[in-house]
Amino acid sequence: MRRSKLRSSSFTPIRAYLDALVHASARHDSLLAARHRAFFATRLFVGLVALAIFPIYLAWRGVPTAVEVIALCWTLTPLLLVWYLSKTGEYERAHLLSACSLALLVGMIGAVTGGIASFVAPWIVVIALEASLSASRRLIVSTIVIALLTAATLWLAVPYPSSIDSAPAWSMIAGAASAAIYAGGLALANSAFARAGQVAKELSEARYRLLAQNMSDVIARHGRDGAITFISPAAEQLTGVPASDLLGHRLFDRVHLADRPAFLTAISDAARGVIPASLEFRLQREPRVAMHRSAPEFVWVEMRSHAIEAGNERREDDSPRQVVSVFRDVSARKSDALAIEHARAEAERANDAKSKFLATVSHELRTPLNAIIGFSEMLGREDEMKLDAARRQDYARLIRDSGEHLLAVVNGILDMSRIEAGHFEIVTEPFAVKPLIESCRKMMSLRAEQAGIQLFSDVAVNLPEINADPRALRQVVINLVSNAIKFTEQGGKIDISVAANLDEIELIVSDTGIGIPEEDIDRLGDPFFQGRSSYDRTYEGTGLGLSVVMGLVKLHGGSVEIESRLRKGTKVTVRLPLDCQKGMKAALNNAIAEFPRRPAQVDRDEPKVRKSA
């Protein structure tokens, strides 16, 4: 271990120097940079060793011959090639120049030392070996051709020596040994390059595994038939099942039935097209906790797919390619979009309610105000108009009625606003219900008689006391009876009944009036809404009466139920606990959030029912 560390530290400066020589165009490709380093290492080794040995050789041999001068000049060629590749980055061209320079040296020395029998003949093999690091078939074929041409030239152009011993034995040994050493250096460089390639491959696979295992998005690969051939581990988080259980067509089996055609179309488009396909669909997910479910759980998933070529395959036809898809859970985004859409709808509804409120309130305020102003002016011009006592009493009564109507409208608006804001004060006390109901009946009997309507009451015997706000309960009864009178035609009747049911009081106000249209059932109790509402409606009113009733009952912890049929009448049932003090604090806090609720689902042939819990 210590020796390997020392060896590694000793080669660090060399590695740093070779890295510095790599051209900028090759530094971002680990394999190409490794090829450059291998080229630099072999050429620098050959050039520097040759320059170091040549002076020693001259000292031993004396004056150099012409061949030795040629060899000395060639030792500068590898260094020039290193400089060329470092400056230009032309890797294949540098290799080709190196092969040509080596072939030229071998040819020149061989021409004067025996041709094909020369001691440099083994270097012909090295010419072809030089390109083995390039991974370029074209370059390898080119160097083989250069080596064959060099051998053919030495064989055909230079006469074969008459005696095999014409060349000194030491030169033959030196030629073969130098060629073997150079070839060995190429083999070592090739081995180093292979190791570098393996390391780069392992690092790339490690990075890929790290990304695939830690990405929240799911990466999948589809075969030509659309089946999943690979899917990342993040699929388990998305679907609740192991990734291995989604291979093949099992992921498709979890796609919502309604989204399967779009899913297959997106994969097909991605396989055949250039532009990536995008789709949002629902995917079944297993519940995190085992439980009995009546329906499967689905999540919204966004899929982006694009085609890939498998390996080095070539497609001459329009056959489908393999597809890589990225899945992302967009349930939260979908939920936010639905919430935004709901908020937009609520804002539009609020704006519509505001417009109707302005139209309704302006109509309801303008009518009594016009009457008050008009009759007041007439009384002020009593002498001019020669009003008698009876006419003056009539005008005074109309002014009073208009003022009371105006006061009722304002009080209704104020009560509703206080109820919605949670500021309506409920003061509970024990009291008997029967006297309160009889008082309300007597109060409304004159108005019912004037409208030609019969008003009856039926209060159960031995009715227990109730702990509630008598003022609020009185307002509930009066508002319900007033509504019933308003929407009941002459000759109809209204019944008020009260009974005890377990621990609650049940108040029912029913009439034989016009009833409520089916399309208006859902909005009963909304402030300023009145059935068959329009600017020229037949029945006056702000629509606040039922809203105030529901709000007051809610504050007492009770419920309201409405049953109605068009032209058959309406029945309103109010249920109040005997002790309304319990749970009133929670009712005050939740009055706005929960009131009024949507109507209960009933058969279309049955009376429509609206409940407020």
Image (tube, helix red, strand yellow):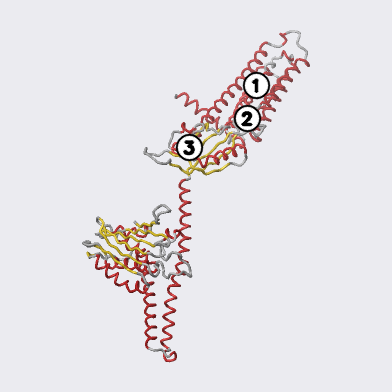
Give the camera-side residue of 21 and 392.
392
Label 2 crowd (10 A; few <14 / some 14-19 / many >=20) = few
> Residue 20 appears at what percent x and percent y?
58, 34
Mark 1 residue element: helix
Label 1 crowd (10 A; few <14 / some 14-19 / many >=20) = some
Mark 3 residue element: helix
Q: Amino acid at mark 2?
A: Glu
Q: Amino acid at mark 3?
A: Arg
Residue labelled with disc 1: 129
- Residues at circles 2 and 3 in contact by the CB criterion of under 8 Å: no
Mark 2 residue element: loop
Q: Quadrant of residue 277?
A: top right
**Residue at the front extreme of this rendering:** 491
Q: Quadrant of residue 82?
A: top right
- Residues at circles 2 and 1 in contact by the CB criterion of under 8 Å: no
Give the camera-side residue of 414 and 195.
414
Of label 1 and label 3, which has the lower sequence position?
A: 1
Residue labelled with disc 2: 313
Position of the N terminus by quadrant: top left
Name the residue located 50 percent from the left edge and 32 percent from the top edge.
247
Q: Amino acid at mark 1?
A: Leu
Give the camera-side residue of 570 and 94.
570
Left or right of residue 473: residue 23: right
Alpha carbons under labels 2 and 1: distance apart: 29 Å
Of label 2 and label 3, which has the lower sequence position?
A: 3
> Residue 338 appears at what percent x and percent y?
47, 51
Label 3 crowd (10 A; few <14 / some 14-19 / many >=20) = some
Q: Taking 324 as reference, is 185 above or below it?
A: above
Residue labelled with disc 3: 254
Of label 2 and label 1, which has the lower sequence position?
A: 1
Label annotation for residue 349? none
